[in-house]
Amino acid sequence: MESSAKITKSIRPQDVQADWWVVDAAGQTVGRLASQVATLIRGKHKASFTPHVDCGDYVVVINADKVVLQGKRADQKEYFHNTGYPGGGRHRRFRDLIKSKPEEVVELAIKGMLPKNSLGRAMHHKMKIYAGTEHPHAAQQPKQYDLPYTQNNA
């Protein structure tokens, strides 16, 4: 008896082919940029995507200091961190953080869109974020990735 059911192929960790991509963040909205980069890091853009395997690509984000937020969001957005001590809540505004640590703004946005488990923590190491246009990953021969959903055509 022949079965007409198709078999789902699950990729193994040793069969993963990871590419390197360069994404230019200049003029991009933080959330739109983060969701598309998280898709690349997770590997959901590949036909061989397997949820329980780290099958994503490495992503180098440049010009992180040139990301934007819409409307009054740039004045209202706050990042909260607790030191672990009583009364240890720390609030940082977007305006201050983008001046002092622009890489952290993009990193926090992307990290929030990855899985909250050991697999997500492993994927977190696949993103490299830089404030300027220079990056030390030329030896990996990264390809330019044009974001399909940008502020201009959204």
Image (cartoon, rainbow, N blue to C red):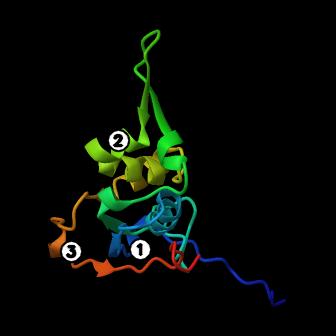
Which percent across, then down, holds residue 24?
34, 71
Q: Nearer the viewer's eye, disc 1 or disc 2?
A: 2
Under circle 1, the secondary element is helix
Toward which corner of the image does residue 83 lie, by quadrant?
top left
Pick the front one: 105 or 125:
105
Which percent across, then down, holds residue 17?
37, 76
Which percent across, then down, holds residue 69?
49, 55
The quadrant of the rendering that contains the C terminus is: bottom right
Q: Nearer the viewer's eye, disc 3 or disc 2?
A: 2
Under circle 2, the secondary element is helix
Q: Report, in whole angstroms, how far the alpha carbon at label 1 lies from the one at label 2.
A: 39 Å
Residue drawn 35% across the image and 41% down it: 97
Mark 2 belongs to which amino acid? Leu
Mark 3 belongs to which amino acid? Gln
Q: Earlier in the sequence, mark 1 or mark 3?
A: 1
Q: Which residue is mark 3?
A: 140
